Amino acid sequence: MNDQIDDTITKEQALHLALDLAKKGLGRVEPNPCVGCVVINERTNKLIALGYHQKFGGAHAEVEALKNLESGEGLTIIVTLEPCSHQGKTPPCANLVASKNFSKLIYIDQDPNPKVSGKGLEIVKASGAKIEKASDEFSKINRQLNSKFFYAFENKATFFHLKWAQSLDGKTSLNGKSKWITGEESRAYGHFLRAQSDAVLIGRETLEKDDPLLDIRIEGFDKKNKVIVFDPKLKSLDDIKNKNVFKLRPPKSVVYLCYETSDSPDVDFLKLKKKPDGEYCLKTLAKDLYEKHSFQSVFVEGGAQTLGAFLKQQEFGRASVFTAPKFLGAQASGPTDSLKFDEISQGSAFEVSDTLTLGDDVFVDLYKK
Amino acid sequence: MNDQIDDTITKEQALHLALDLAKKGLGRVEPNPCVGCVVINERTNKLIALGYHQKFGGAHAEVEALKNLESGEGLTIIVTLEPCSHQGKTPPCANLVASKNFSKLIYIDQDPNPKVSGKGLEIVKASGAKIEKASDEFSKINRQLNSKFFYAFENKATFFHLKWAQSLDGKTSLNGKSKWITGEESRAYGHFLRAQSDAVLIGRETLEKDDPLLDIRIEGFDKKNKVIVFDPKLKSLDDIKNKNVFKLRPPKSVVYLCYETSDSPDVDFLKLKKKPDGEYCLKTLAKDLYEKHSFQSVFVEGGAQTLGAFLKQQEFGRASVFTAPKFLGAQASGPTDSLKFDEISQGSAFEVSDTLTLGDDVFVDLYKK
């Protein structure tokens, strides 16, 4: 019955396929963007080739897709992101694409990197290919998939991705304990999300009480992430060498956020700036982390007080919330304990991008509206 | 290509089909159970007939399935619940099934109603049919689908089904306002859940502040539900005639739960009993509501304080929670404000039976473990 299967592919299907392929790079390619590439024959609706960026430092999507293709004549190449035009860890893809003489290139988004933006398209256009921009619906998916990449380039600031595990009544810890609220599947998925940022940020109390590892403990993800400790008065600095986050990483992998820096040679420091109201300014922090540490995105894991500060100052792009089917009651604390609103309409509202059932837990992925 | 479709049905598939059919009665058949019936030929794996109980007072599942079937010889009848043996609103189904001379009857659960239990099976067996009980996996689904029906008969007590709409941080109201936390799809689904109980229970404050209608405002569900007001000191009684819940219903449709009853002819009263610690006893209330008012299940909708009492005394079987992607912060209140635990392991744990995305909201259906 196989000959009954419709194996043709429309342009729309090919665009979705390119995005699905791109997504497979999540947690492996950062701080590069997730990119997919599909080659089709628009006349016969045949799928000719495909590829995606699989790993940071590895081949780009176009290189993967074109490795066995001699000529692009009569064919359409679809890319989720404009082909790069600069020499990075790999040679520029725009030149490779141009060399194949495609009839058409369809792209979903231009590269926000000023080194590329528009230049990659120019190179391909000069080879005689018609250049077409995909419709906005695809761009919406692509920009959410690569929200950290786009945000950092467009705002010259670090993207904060908040994550926490809570009870149904929004609590993340009870009497200082926060472990094991959610189940195994949720924790594994949390590691996958952690792999998608350059660094993990925690507050001093979490460092001292939980002494977490904060590495990525799922197979196939060998990324070395840095750790940022929110400790304005450097109270935990004397003891940092005894902590897992330090012992597990090469020197200078821990960054302290503080008011006054110290001369410790083992860790890095970043000075917090105050707002007129006396609170530290997270907007400035986002700028400084990007400029001084080149962090495209930081995964903020808690505790409740630290998360609360980001929620209060509305300084984040995404919040990933794991909810366990249990209640912890009034004596437990949560990230919104410091938020005060007078009207329901003032409550922060989000766009839900994803909902998953993970074991007994429910996962909700939210983007700031 | 239609002749290529595999139109046979296995016994397992037929059992699942019977349960799926039964489910279509939800919100329409209560306080009757949801029941489905499928007739198959086990030798040829052909589906012969099907039916389900569609509406309270309407034909039972077996009557629906057998209306065009002359003889059951050589056939197997599958029922999710033992055929009834007593004359209710309709004649006994066991006699109808027996009259068709089926070769086999497969049932998922016996009827917990002492008027039926086992007697329906006996009648069919006497007609010469082999009687077979389906495996426990089907019973688990059936007992959850009909949890109110089974609970009430087995415990001689009313089943409490809690429902609330909350923010991501578990809050249900802010400055006394609780409307419009969740969206339209969630509210419609809430009405569907409301249709599955005999009465709705609210606290005095909710009655006074929100003046809700508490009817079922979705098409095709014309059930007249009663209203129970939790008002131990009858503070709202003088004004009840001006309230929507009263105006919308025939006399005696509102039941007050209180310490001392009054002689008002317009409403009903049920006296609350106290526990040794001075709090009212919800376990006793469940018994009294069942014995004196024949309520199989009551839908508890709030406010936070009322829901909190049920959570605290662990007197409920199911909790349906709608969560909106927003935070309401520390000044808002929620149903777990009165719950106090010292350890995470003490927090009430539930089994998640269902998760849905409803518009921007996430719905989680929980059963007490």
Image (cartoon, coloured by chain):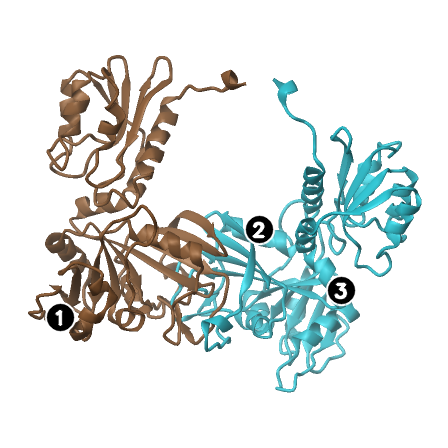
Chain colours: A brown, B cyan
Label 3 to label 1, Cα distance in Å? 65 Å
Question: For mark 2, what is the residue?
Answer: B189
Q: Nearer the viewer, residue A285 or B105?
A: B105
Q: Is circle 2 on the same chain as circle 1?
A: no
Q: Residues within 10 Å of mark 1 (few under 14, many from 20)?
A: some
Label 3: state its secondary structure. Answer: helix
- Identify the residue shown where x is 48% and y is 65%: B172
Whether pointer 2 and pointer 3 mark residues with C-beta atoms closer than 8 Å, the reply is no
Tag nearer the camera, 2 or 3 = 3
Please tell me the numbered disc located at residue A259: 1
Q: Is circle 3 on the same chain as circle 1?
A: no
**Circle 1 marks a residue in which chain?**
A
Asked if residue B204 lies left or right of residue A236, the reply is right
Q: Is circle 2 on the same chain as circle 3?
A: yes
- Residue B89 pos. (x, y %): 86, 51
Label 2 to label 3, Cα distance in Å? 28 Å
Label 2 to label 1, Cα distance in Å? 51 Å
Q: Earlier in the sequence, mark 2 or mark 3?
A: 3
Q: Residue furthest left?
A: A263
Question: For mark 3, what is the residue?
Answer: B154
Q: Nearer the viewer, residue B113 or B75?
A: B75
In this orientation, does residue A236 appear? Answer: yes
- Residue A293 pos. (x, y %): 13, 54
